[in-house]
Image (cartoon, grey):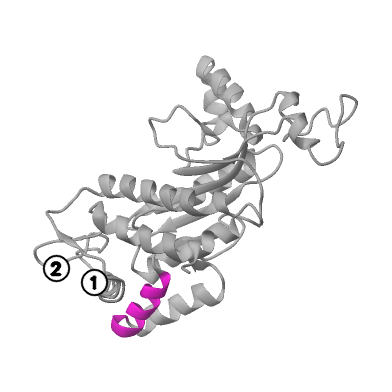
Amino acid sequence: MEALIAKARFHFHKRMFETNTLTLTKTGVVSNADTSSKGSKAISKKIVDILIGERGHKINITEKISGQTLGKQFEHLTMEFLQETFPNLQNLYPGKWSILQLGNNNKLKTSDFQQYEHLAYLNALTAENSQLAAALGNDYLVAPDVVIYRELYEDVEINSKQYVVNNDVSKMADIRRSNGGKPLLHASVSAKYTMRSDRAQNSRTEALNLIRNRKGHLPHIVVVTAEPMPNRIASLALGTGDIDCVYHFALYELMRAVKEVGSEDAIETLNTLVKGKRLKDISDLPLDLAV
């Protein structure tokens, strides 16, 4: 019997190929490789070779696809993977879960969650007062790529196994729907297909904003990436205090690829990230979110 997460991991990789998120150019360069970096091209190609040779995936040869398109596709596939796994861990972390790719066009915003609802008020104030906007800035506005949030409970659900609450107590508890609150943000997932520019550091800025501006429980703050170069992953993964951890779409294959074609520096950097628990495989993410 195949394990749930193992099956979902295989499906995630299969979808990467099917949706042309992972492709080859006519010259043999993988879509997540930096064409100006010999190491990036070699490592990404080796990862693809492993996935094709050992997992039976098939890759398409296409013209170059824009980075923005690849990024959005990777966000969507990350959301699909989490939808396929995390809600099924009810024995570890029960709840009524919703998992969505927010994006710029989604009507749902960070301020629609209990911990950040006050940001909508701040946004309205700064929109009306330019001096206040100049003083406060708009750094508190955060738009995660993918979110996991928990729906609130009716009193009848809370009291289903024993009489837990009545109208005299728990009048401000966030998880109680009768208190008039909003859904609880459980996790903010930043999906970075590659880390080829300073834009990858936006994930750290978003994390710090979530930490600084919350009222109540801090959600999980994680990054998922398909970046092949360990030193670029390290630029975001090293250090603590902001991001919980960085998760690679194919860490096992990356580790093997770096050993076979990477430099000594790349091998050392990757070992540091893995042993220091700053970089994990995508398959670790659902279980880590159940903590």
Q: Is residue 60 above or below residue 190?
A: below
Element at label 2: loop
Q: Amino acid at mark 1?
A: Lys
Query: Magenta segment: does it hold 225?
Result: no
Of mark 1 and mark 2, the one earlier in the sequence is 2
Residue under the image location 28 percent in, 82 percent down: 261
Residue placed under numbered mark 2 in the picture: 28
Q: Report the magenta stretch's main SS.
A: helix
Question: Which quadrant of the view contains residue 264?
Answer: bottom left
The x and y percentages for residue 172 are 79, 29
Specify whether 148 is left or right of 11.
right
Query: Magenta segment: does it hold 256?
Result: yes
Q: Amino acid at mark 2?
A: Gly
The x and y percentages for residue 253 are 36, 74
Q: Is residue 191 above or below residue 257?
A: above
Magenta-colored span? 251-262
Residue placed under numbered mark 1 in the picture: 45
Question: Which quadrant of the view contains residue 31?
Answer: bottom left
Element at label 1: helix
Specify whether 17 is left or right of 187.
left
